[in-house]
Amino acid sequence: MSDHIVKAYDQELEVLGQKIAEMGGIAEKMLSDAMDALVDSDVKLAQATINSDPRLDVLQREIEERAIMTIARRQPLAVDLREIIATIRISNDLERVGDLAKNIAKRAIKIAADVRIPRAIIGLRSMHESAAMLLKDVLDAYSQRDAERAHGVWIYDADLDALEDSVFRDLLTFMMEDPRNISFCAHLLFCSKNIERIGDHATNIAETVIYLVTGEIPPIDRPKGRTMLSETSTTVG
Amino acid sequence: MSDHIVKAYDQELEVLGQKIAEMGGIAEKMLSDAMDALVDSDVKLAQATINSDPRLDVLQREIEERAIMTIARRQPLAVDLREIIATIRISNDLERVGDLAKNIAKRAIKIAADVRIPRAIIGLRSMHESAAMLLKDVLDAYSQRDAERAHGVWIYDADLDALEDSVFRDLLTFMMEDPRNISFCAHLLFCSKNIERIGDHATNIAETVIYLVTGEIPPIDRPKGRTMLSETSTTVG
C-alpha cells in the first residue's frame, strides 16, 4: 500500500480501537452497577444500567459497519485483516456482556422488594469480582496487544465456572431450607449464570487477542467452546 | 462487474447459502434431539446431541472466513454486501442455537437419574414446539427470501417470552410444593431459558432476513433488543 493509503488505513483502525475502548468502559461499568444494584436493592441504579445498553448496541453496529467497509475498500494484508476481524469479534462479545449485565439489572428490580438472604449473595459477589477482573485484564491485554496476559484470562475462566457450580449448589440448599427463599434464589441462579457467561465472553476476547497478536488459535482443549477464524490465507485480494 | 466476475461471485454466494442450510438442519436436529433426551431421560441421545456441536462451530468459522474473503476480493455493491453480511450474522445465530441445544442436552444428562415430574415438563414441551416452529419458519423465510414470513417470526417471539414467564412461575410452584423437586426444577428453569433464547436467535435471524430482502431495519420497538447494521452506504469501494 502507498503511504497515503497506509495512513488512511491506520486512522480507520484507530477509530475502531477507540470505539472498542468506549464499549469496554461501558460494559465494565454496567456489570459493576448491575451488581451494586442487586446487592443494595437499588432500583434506580438498575434502571440506569438498563438505559446504558442501547449505546453499546449502537457502538457495536458502528464497528461492524466501519470494519466491513474498511475490508471492502482497503483489501488488507493478513495481519491487518486480523486487526479488523478482531474489532468485529470483540465488539460482539462486549455487546453480549452488556446484555448479560442488563439481565442482572432486570433481576435486581424484580427482587428488590423481596426479603434479602445475605448468605445467598456472598457467592455472587465472589463471582462478580472474578468476572470483573477477567474483563479488565482482557481489555488491557487487547489495548496492549499482550498475548500472555490474554492467555492468563483464558486459563483463569475455568475457576469462575467452578465457582458457579458451587454457587448453584448453595442456592439450592437455601431453597431447600425454606420455601420462602425459592423465588429470590431462583432469580439469583440466573444472575450467577449471567456472570459466568460474562467470563465466557472474556475468554472469547482473550482468544481473539491471542489470534490477533500471534495469528494462532489456542488449542482445542481450551476452557470454553468457541472456535475461531483460522489463518488459511496469508494475503487477501 | 463483468459477467465472469459475477459468475464467480454467485458461486461464492451459493456455497455460503449451502453452508447456512447445513447449519440450519443441524441446529434444528440438535434442538429436537435435546428435548427428546430431556423428556425420555435418554443419556445416549443427549451425548450425541453434544457431539454434533463442533460441526456447527466449524461451519460457522468457514462461513465467516469465506464471507470476509469474498468482501475483500469482490468489493460488492450494497445489495450483494447485504447477502454476505446476512450469512455471517445468521451463522452466528445458528451457532448460538446449537450451543443452547447443547446446554439442554447437558442438563438432560444431569437430571436423567432424578425422579420425573411430568407436570413440570409439559410447559417446556409447549415452549419447544413454539421455538422449533420459529426456527423452521425463519430458515424457510431465509431460503425463500420471504420478508413477510420473517416478520411473522419476529412478531410471534413475544408469545414464547410470555410462555417462559408462565413456565418460570409453574416451576417455582413445584419447588415450593416439595423440596425434593427443587434440584430437578432448577435445571428445568435453565432449560426453559435456553429455549426462550433460541426464540431470540430466531428473531435475530428474522431481522436479518428483513434487512436482506428490504434493506430496512425493523422498528426500534421490536420484541427483542438486537440492533442491526444500518444501510448507510449504497455502494462499497
Image (spheres, coloured by chain):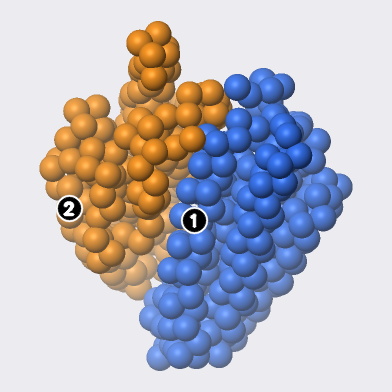
Chain colours: A blue, B orange
The residue under the point 43% across, 78% down is A51
The quarter of the rendered structure image containing the N terminus of chain B is top left
Q: Secondary structure at mark 2?
A: helix
User: Does A124 sit left or right of A206 as displayed?
Assistant: left
The residue under the point 42% across, 29% down is B76
Q: Nearer the viewer, residue A84 or A28?
A: A84
Q: Give the residue number, with chain letter if any, for mark 2.
A: B156
**Residue A136, quarter of the rendered image:** bottom right
| Residue B97 in the image: above or below residue A25 | above
| Residue A231 in the image: above or below residue A125 | above
Residue A183 place in picture, x, y as percent:
40, 76
The residue under the point 26% across, 49% down is B216
**Residue B79, quarter of the rendered image:** top left
The amino acid pointed to by label 2 is Tyr
Mark 1 or 2: in front is 1
What's the distance in space between the residues labelled 1 and 2, CA to CA?
28 Å
Q: Give the residue number, with chain letter if any, for mark 1.
A: A62
